Amino acid sequence: MADTFTPIAPRPAPVDTEGFVPWVKRNLFGDWKSALTTIVLLGVALYLLPQAANWAVVQAVFGADANACQAARGSGACWGVVTEKWRLIVFGRYPFEQQWRPELATALMVGALVVSCIRWFWKPWLAALWVGVLAVFFVLMGGGVLGLEPVRTDLWGGLPLTVMLATLSIFLAFPLSVLVALGRRSNLPAIRTVCVVYIELIRGVPLISVLFMASFMFPLFMPQGTTIDVLVRVLVGITLFAAAYMAEIVRGGLQAIPKGQLEAADTLGLTYWQTQRKIVLPQALAMTVPSMMNNFISIFKDTSLVTIVSLYELTGALGLALNSDVDWRPFKLEAYFFITAIYFTFCFAMSRYSLWVEKQVAVSRVR
């Protein structure tokens, strides 16, 4: 008998796992607990968001009118405090007529940071670019040359000071942390002991203590008549503090490298520094990207502690702007929302960049 053709029943289409709807099903309604939590949070948001929008937008006062803000107090936000005080908050005590200088200097440094994060610009000339940017930054901020009016460092403040301290402390702390981490794993007892003492001593005290020592105690050990600018002392203190924590992060990456790779490098005749540069450090630093970026974000936020040594960065400049003005002092909350948005913008950008770097590193490990 001739065989008869029997068609196979159609199979269901594959479930789509990409896109917004599958993401919602997987992350927000994956099981009954997740679905219940999502519904409760949505209910709370629907209850609170209209009230928040009414306070922040509908009933808010945007003009720099203290009387209007007092009238709307309790029912609407007073964004007029930002309109009135934003220059003092962003630039601190820097002379008003010269504030174009910190504005331009900050824009140049932030632009250099953005360029440094783009892979296409990872060229040898990038180091020369940073040397030029830093030179222009300090010339603009300090003045005294090219016809610019001199401005003392104790008058620097606000966002320029925050960006400068965070950027330079990160750049200086990173190579120091790598050297300290390598030193702690060294076979030479003297080098290992020095690195261990440095790490444990710095990590055993809060940053406020380090800043206090750098600003007030360190000058006592200097020869009579010798003074070091307070900004330099604070920068050194933050750098040493950040490097100690970062060194432990790097050491964790170094310990994750299989011993067999080191033995293979010895077999090939590679020197110690060739092994570290070509085999160990590229892998160790790649594995520590999340922890490293977390430390960078922490450094950026920790710059707010320099207020203790009378350097008024972003949060210190806010207090300086409002504490001396009784008309605007009641509206600190709105001013804090303003600087919160600035901090969030920088920290969120660093977090997103960290995720991008992690994806690039993950691609290099795909077999």
Image (tube, rainbow, N blue to C red):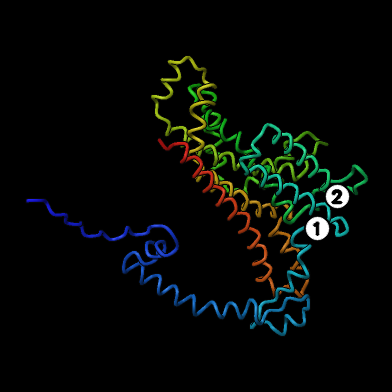
**Height in image: 181 above or below 189?**
below
Hey, which quadrant is residue 4 in on the image?
bottom left
Q: Position of residue 303 (x, y in %)?
A: 65, 51
- Work out which residue is located at the far front of the displayed protein and give it: 2
**Is 281 left or right of 149, judged from the image as shown?**
left
Q: Residue at x 75, y 35 (%)?
A: 222
Residue at (62% x, 44% y) in the render:
117
- Which of 358 and 223 lies nearest the eye of the viewer? 358
For this orientation, the residue located farthest to the bottom is 71
Left or right placement of residue 303 versus residue 272 in this view: right
Number of residues whose C-alpha sits closer than 10 Å to that of mark 2, classed few (under 14), some (14–19) or many (20 or more)? some
SS type, badge 1: loop
Mark 1 to mark 2 CA distance (whole Å): 10 Å
Expressed as whole percent of the image width and height from the top left, the position of residue 295 reads: 55, 46
Which residue lies under the disc numbered 2? 151
Q: Are discs 1 and 2 less than 8 Å apart at CB?
A: no
Q: Position of residue 170 (x, y in %)?
A: 63, 42
Q: Which residue is mark 1?
A: 93
Amino acid at dot 1: Arg
Comparing 241 with 138, the one in front is 138
Quadrant where the C terminus sits is top left
* Number of on-image labels: 2
Which amino acid lies under the numbered mark 2 shown in the image of this protein?
A: Val
Residue nearest the observer in this picture, 116 or 85 = 116
Looking at the rendering, which quadrant does residue 58 occupy? bottom right
Identify the residue at horizontal 63%, vertical 45% (top origin). Answer: 210
Where residue 94 sits: x, y (%)? Answer: 82, 56
